Image (tube, grey):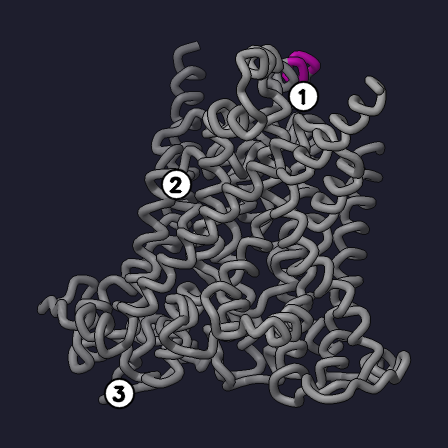
Amino acid sequence: MNEKLRTAAIAKDNFQNFLFVLPAVIIFCIFYVYPFLNMIFLSFHEWIGIGPMHFIGLKNYTELMGDHIWWNSIGHAAYITLIALTFQNALAFALALACDREIRMKRFYRVVFFIPPVLSEVVVGLIWNWILNPEMQNGQHIGLLNSFLYHSGFPQLVHNWLGDPQTALTTIAIVNSWKGFGWGFIIMLAGLQTIDKQLYEAARIDGAGRWKAFIHVTIPMMLPVLAVVMILTILGCMQVFVLIIAMVNEGLVNHTDVPVTCIFSAMQNTNRFGYACAEAVIFGIILVTLSFLTKKVTDRFKQA
Amino acid sequence: MSTRFSKYTAWKMIQSTLIHIFLMSVTLTCLFPLLWMFRCSFMTNDTVFVDQGLIPHHLDFSNFASAWTKGNFGVYFINSVIYTVSVVFGIVLISSLAAYAFSRLKFPGKNILFYLFVAAMMIPLPGSFVALFVLMTKLHLINTRLGYILCMINVGLSMSILLLKTFFDKMPHDLEDAARIDGCSKIGIWLHMALPFARPAIAVIVIFNSLNVWNEYILAFLLLGDSNLMPLQRGLVVFQGANSTDYPVLMAGLTMAAVPIIMVYLFMQKYIVKGLSSGEVIG
């Protein structure tokens, strides 16, 4: 009898405890798990968003393999990511190194560098769209950049930065780096500050100069932090979309397409929900693979 | 000896000057576009193309008024506030309940559920919005505040649960035991002990999710077609599409969207730095 009462009490206890996680689990299942599974399900179907669905097996995927617009869009995102990985992260690291010392106004710099990252992509995109405005009025360049170039003696550099397919993507990548370097800076600075100063002392006693200490102490100690920054950069930049919408509107579609743009246009412009889901699945796999590879490569370096 | 010393200090001074020049030039690049936006929001359509000085000759405040009423930014702004407040409140409530249970209470399937939440945070789902749109259409939640709020709660949930759980794990056990002996219920312990204990972690969650909701665009674009329901970010793009040449009013709208977030950041940056460096928060 006592045993029975005890198990009943435990069951009631378990149930009460489960009620704590229930709201989270419900929301998670409805808005995360179900769409996730449904995305995979839909990717094997042809469907216009309404009416009957047709199972077509892997046809969406085989079509996707030969879709030049899609692979170009991956290339565009990869280009933006590459600039972020090199230029943006190098800048962030240099700034973090410059601030990781006794220097005046350190707090000020730290506050300022993180302002662009807290702004939305829409705000950043529209401000730069205005600064890069290519038009002229009454013989004056109305965009700040072109006006500056004209008045500071470089009129030959005046350019329609976002309108020219040759420069549009690079311009977007630079604005993207402008918005993003503060993230890396803050994380790297926090990482640098956790390095034990005795390590530098020991390196100095062993006769290592500044440069050697940097190579043999700073870099190895920073590898895990650099890996995190790299993974965050890859995931963030590959999914860039809103910034581009805000900067170029619909103007230059094919030259500045990124994967998310393609998914949106498959869904909204051509009503091909199944195809959009197939793109989403492939894109998700690419992202997971990229971050996994980054992790692997940095782990390899850590062991060496 | 003394010459060597002065050489050393001179080199130090040159070095620190160079570093400051480097840092200042980046600072300028960060701030100048924002100052330019701010400046242009005080000009008129006639002067904005002519007056090239940094400080306009004539300050015109009418842009903010016309953005607020004619540009519909008043509605957008209030919507953004509604969404941010209700989503953040929902996330704090739901995630703190769940994180407390994951940290302290026993029930079958606990570990599996927790790892599911962690995995959800790790796996990026860039295209799940297609399926989400399908789901919301089925549930008749397209073009409703509730639908957007629920979706945004889901976006911030995993990260918040993870952060709070690691915090609750550090809570001393004896306090809880004492409260339980005094007859405090589980929900009472959560409310009176766990929540106050986790205040710093909750501050981090509130700030990161506020930034995230205030700045969100994609789901707002997808789910809210009615301009009376749109948040600021969506409204800005709609306005720019409709009045592509009315730059001063657009800049006033941008200022309205940017200034609150910069203010929150400036007052709360202690927590932002803490959240970034402790939890590797994915933004």
Counting from the top left corner in percent of width and height, residue B202 is at: 48, 35
Choose between B186 and B101: the one closer to the eye. B186
Residue A172 appears in view: no
Q: Which residue is mark 3?
A: A137
Assess whether residue A78 is covered by the magenta stretch: no
Left or right for B50, reference B274: left
Residue at image position (73%, 53%) is: B123
Is residue B77 or residue B252 the one in the foreground? Answer: B77
Instruction: Say what secondary structure mark 1 lies in.
Output: loop
* Identity, as a three-letter code, of the amino acid under mark 3: Gln
For the magenta stretch, what is the residue range? A202-206
In the rendered image, residue B80, in percent from the top left (x then y), is placed at: 38, 61
Marks 2 and 3, the one that precedes in the sequence:
2
Q: Residue at x 38, y 33 (%)?
A: A107
Helix, strand or loop for disc 2: helix
Residue ID for mark 1: A208
Does residue B201 appear in the picture of this structure? yes
> On what subunit does the disc labeled 2 rest?
A
Sequence-first disc among 1 and 3: 3
| Earlier residue among tags 1 and 2 | 2
Q: Which one is in front, A113 or B196?
A: B196
Q: Amino acid at mark 2?
A: Val
